[in-house]
Image (cartoon, grey):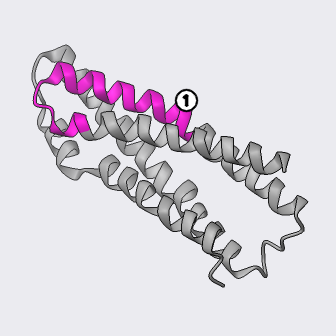
Amino acid sequence: MMLRLIHLLALFWMMGGLGATLIPLWRAWRTEGIEEKTLLLMQARSAQVLWLMPGMIAAAVTGFAWAAADDWNPVTTGWLVALEAVFALDIFLFLPLLAVGLRRVELLALIARRDGAESAELRQALADNVPVVFGTLIALTVPVMAWLAVAKPF
């Protein structure tokens, strides 16, 4: 019971980090002014590093501990394997691509803020939408993971 509570708290931590990262990130993509865009990107990057990454790691560790304590086999339990696969996709592919893309855009925005004008490289990075796409993909996998954990379809 205690591991379930700790895991639930880790999930709240992860979801708080996801919201704290994605909301300023989405706002930054819609903002025209370089000053506000830079501040929003810095806020998103900070939330991603301080809340989202540690929250995802905590969710993984506590989930594994809970599964081990309840004697679930992480290899033969079908729904758990599917949940692990989706989470692995999030933590090993989507999160790093979000982080790299966000860091790139943040640095280019800081340079543009210093110079007083958007560069062509910043416009190209914003047109790529890398952090927005992969951040949104992480958000879209959360209901899938919740469904797998609650419904246990197989």
Q: Quadrant of residue 110?
A: top left
Residue occupied by mark 1: 50
Instruction: Tell me if residue 114 comes above or below residue 38 in the rendering.
Output: above
Q: Residue at x 29, y 36 (%)?
A: 105
Question: Which residues make up the magenta segment?
Answer: 27-53
Quadrant holding the C terminus = bottom right
Position of residue 152 measured from the top left corner of the image (x, y, whole percent): 66, 76
Position of residue 99 measured from the top left corner of the image (x, y, whole percent): 44, 42
Residue closest to the eye, 130 or 40: 40
Q: How many badges with numbers are in the image? A: 1
As for residue 91 lying within the magenta part, the answer is no
Position of residue 26 measured from the top left corner of the image (x, y, whole percent): 27, 41
Give the main secondary structure of the magenta stretch: helix
Position of residue 135 measured from the top left corner of the image (x, y, whole percent): 39, 50
Residue type at mark 1 is Leu
Q: Residue at x 52, y 44 (%)?
A: 15
